[in-house]
Amino acid sequence: MAAITTTGLGKVYPGGVRALDALDLSITDGEFFALLGPSGCGKTTLLRTLAGLESPTSGSITIGTSDVTRLPPGRRDVAMVFQDYALFPHMTTADNIAYPLRVNGVPKSSRHDKAAQIAAELGLAELLARRPGQLSGGQQQRAALARAMACHPKAFLFDEPLSNLDARMRLEARSFLKRLQRQLGVTTVFVTHDQSEALAMADRIAVMESGHIRQIGTPVEVFRRPSNIFVASFIGSTPMNLLEAMVVDGQVETCGQRLVVPNGVIAGLANGVSFVLGLRPEYLTLHTASVPGALCGVVAVVENLGSQQLVSLEVSGTTVRCVVTEDAEPALGAECWLVPRAERVLVYLDGELVEDAVLSDAR
Amino acid sequence: MTAGAGPTMTRVRGRNTGAVAADQDAAGLGRWRAGLFVLPALVLIGVFLVLPALWTIYLGATDFQLTGTAAAQPRIVGMDNLLSVFSGGGFAGSLLLTLEYVVGSAVVGQAGLGLALAWVMRDRRGVLRRVVDAVVLLAWILPNSVVAFLWIALLDRDSGTLNALLGTPGFGWLLRYPMLSIIVFNIWRGTAFSQMLYSAALANVPRSQLETARLTGATPWRQLWDVVLPQIRGHVLTNLLLVSLWTFNDFTPFLLTAGGPDHRSETLPVFVYVTALTGGQLGLGAAISFVMLLVNLVIAFGYLRLLGRRKDGAA
């Protein structure tokens, strides 16, 4: 129902800690937007600043058509779901859900009808008379969501929505949240430190590091083409191989070996330039027979990921990981060859991705 | 034969006590050995609390005096003292003054102001917070006699600080408004306790709940009423119980007004003192003390019932 825009948003805490550094962000109407980053990167501060619980020291925030930078939280028309759900322990589920309506002066009977209706949508109909202490973690979360939905806000803000659930519930809640957000079509910003959560749920992700946004993009974009080494190492459940490399005679030399890469990958780099080669384990193919121009290494560790195996190879003293299917498990100590998938080779110069015309077309 | 029977019997007895107390006896000591641990405390309580209380009841049934023949050979007069406590005008008036003192200075003053201070200061850090904490705590840690002296210096008719500030020389605060004076005095004196207790209680209410309420547009007053007070109800009642009883039994007003003028600030502890020590009627004083004890118990049971209802409601 509303787009959210920040312009030059900054937050400096007393004592000089710069939590947000001139952030320009634009979240479109109805988008499911993730703020992703390690702890202390400012993602929660940004969310709380959008909510009005923290005031920015510079810049402005627009929600819908109005500038809300100086508005108190209660007048921004946004609802927030906290990590601990923040349900009022002395109120029943019904009273909790109806609380925003009560504050806004809705008469008792109609606010209870409304609460019952929302509770039914979220499968809480049987639990209306219970206190939060008598609900499971997942039920508490849905009660908190119902409370957030009660007054039809312009936007939802979720702070680590899944972190208080156990692993199994988390998967369930993930699909539930995504479906709910799509149904309601309400602009939603959520904070997470778990990259798999962000990739799974969000329409777009902002990856943050120490008060800066390092990349904004769809899950596919941040996974396939992380725009810098920070994002590259942060995204992906198996970390990307980031190998020191150098251009020698127009070819790539890394780990003391020559690696044949597709044409154009290093087209813009002069001889003798050092760079970092980014190869996702998922995008490396393992061969047990010699392949010319491939990285040759010895299998050191094989980790079972269920339907896949994570193989760590020692390549001239450097560990390079690759993911293989369950049928192709190599023997420990065997000599293997790694061939990167042509359109997935990434080159980082001074920490930033080198965008390549040829590759962009290939993508 | 006997050597074999002994241990068997012990084992059986041990098993029995274990089975009986298994659900209540976490330490596995059994009733008697656990009792031994409590015994020293019980003896002390018996000697220093229960015995004097019983002694008071006994004294209250005699015509024991500070001086004269009745001091040497007190006679048992039965219910006479109690009857004269209730028939004499002094007790009822004093009880009313005491209730005025308790409600004014403890319930409304200390507890109310303490909660207000704790709520306003909840998110404050830095200089202001430290100054307020220091001032409030200072009032709490000073000895009674010192505080009383300071307040006499403040309220003195001829050279008091307050009269100098207000430009009203010669106004006798303690004479014109004795009850108001000791009520304000006791608020100043005892608010620290309530404030600290409420600060600790407020710290237990998760910030996220207050912030959720804020995001719905709830004013600070509504946050306090809807979110905080229901959750700290137990703290509120415990605090009220303590400050009510302390104030009910507080003797410090005597240091300011000595119960006067004309008994207008003679709360029950002062009334007992005046009767028993100034008037010398120890037996009558003991009877009044006994009635005070009963009033204390009524107050305590009232609060404890409210607390108990909270627990039932939560279960």
Image: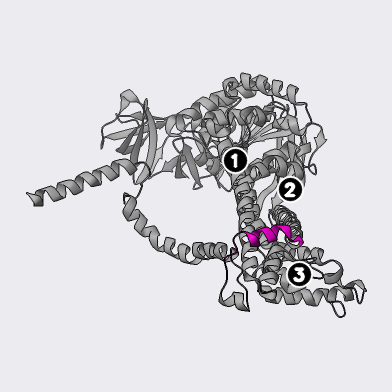
Gap between marks 3 and 1 measured at Cα: 39 Å
- Give the side of residue B154 with respect to residue A54, left or right: right
Q: Nearer the viewer, mark 3 or mark 1?
A: 3
Which circle marks residue B113 in the picture? none
Residue that badge 1 annotates? B310
Q: Residue furthest left?
A: B1
Q: CA distance from mark 1 to mark 2?
A: 42 Å
> Which residue in the structure is indicated by mark 2?
A56
Return the x and y of residue B259 as percentages of the image width and height.
76, 69
Q: Which amino acid does the dot numbered 2 rest on?
A: Pro
Dot 1 falls on a residue whose secondary structure is helix
> Badge 3: how crowded within 10 Å, few (<14), some, or many (20+)?
many
| Residue neighbourhood size for the residue with mark 1, other residues' Cα within 10 Å, grouped as few (<14), some (14–19), many (≥20) | some
Residue A8: name its quadrant.
Answer: top right
> The residue tagged with tag 3: helix, strand or loop?
loop
| Vertical placement of residue B264 versus A71, above or below | below
Colour approach in the figure: one colour
For the residues carrying marks 1 and 2, which lies nearer the camera in this image? 1
Give the prevailing secondary structure in the magenta stretch.
helix
Discs 2 and 3 share one subunit: no
